[in-house]
Amino acid sequence: TFAFDNGRVLGQHMNIEGSLERMVNSVLPHEVTHTVFAHYFRHPVPRWADEGGAVLSEDEIEKNRHDQLVRQILNSHREMPLRRLFSLRDYPQDVMVLYAQGFSVANFLVGTSSKPAFLAFVAQGMQSPGGWDQAIQSHYRYRNVEELEQAWLTHLRNTRLLPPMILHVAATPAATFLASVRATKTPPQPCSPQYRIKHFWRETK
């Protein structure tokens, strides 16, 4: 949780739970990224960008799971138009849509440009309700949100699902997501804790 006031972060609090393997590889990088975003933007970050960018900091297990989830959401026609997704200031009833689509769109934008460009895009887009179209024109090659949405959907159609190793990972309940508890039952993966704790966005400076 964060407390903002006139471009300042007045207070913050983090509480994480889960197995050591999941906390080091997933939960801690996710929550540290929220902290980095809070101090970088110094204002509440749009939910889709905040959660989507935070998932980008997690390990391949979580990123693969979110990639599979967004495809399931699209196949079941539960997706949210990006113009509505970008305007959300709170979590929707179907919170999994926000997490999955937020990750997928953030991953697409970072993959087609860079992390600094993504941060600049979010910073400009969050300034006003109609700022997303201008931000897209400034930082990407699209004319508006709808054109970006079509490019993102085309990208998903033209790419295969990520490795099937994720198929055995159970979906995390929405309440667990909101509490930032990532206790998925997955086998420990070989990794360096020091590497994982160095969060995904460190190279933007």
Image (cartoon, helix red, strand yellow):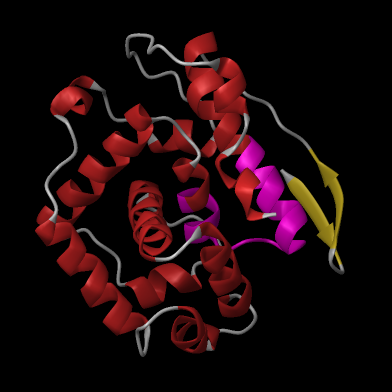
Closer-to-camera residue (112/187): 112
Q: Position of residue 134 (x, y in %)?
A: 50, 89
Q: Quadrant of residue 46?
A: bottom right
Closer-to-camera residue (141/56): 141
Q: Quadrant of residue 20?
A: top right
Q: Position of residue 35 (x, y in %)?
A: 70, 44
Q: Residue at x 39, y 53 (%)?
A: 93
The answer to if 141 sits in the magenta stretch is no
Q: Is residue 56 above or below residue 109?
A: above
Q: Is residue 17 visible?
A: no
Left or right: residue 164 versus residue 188 is: left
Q: Quadrant of residue 78?
A: bottom left
Prevailing secondary structure of the magenta residues = helix
Q: Is residue 195 visible?
A: yes
Closer-to-camera residue (45/159): 159
Q: Residue at x 85, y 45 (%)?
A: 11
Q: Quadrant of the C terminus?
A: bottom right
Q: Which residues are magenta?
A: 32-52
Q: Residue at x 39, y 51 (%)?
A: 103
Q: Position of residue 83 (x, y in %)?
A: 38, 77
Left or right: residue 146 versus residue 8 is: left
Left or right: residue 116 versus residue 111 is: right
Tally the marks: 0
The answer to if 51 sits in the magenta stretch is yes
Q: Position of residue 57 (x, y in %)?
A: 50, 39
Q: Quadrant of the N terminus?
A: top right
Q: Residue at x 47, y 36 (%)?
A: 177
Left or right: residue 65 versus residue 162 is: right
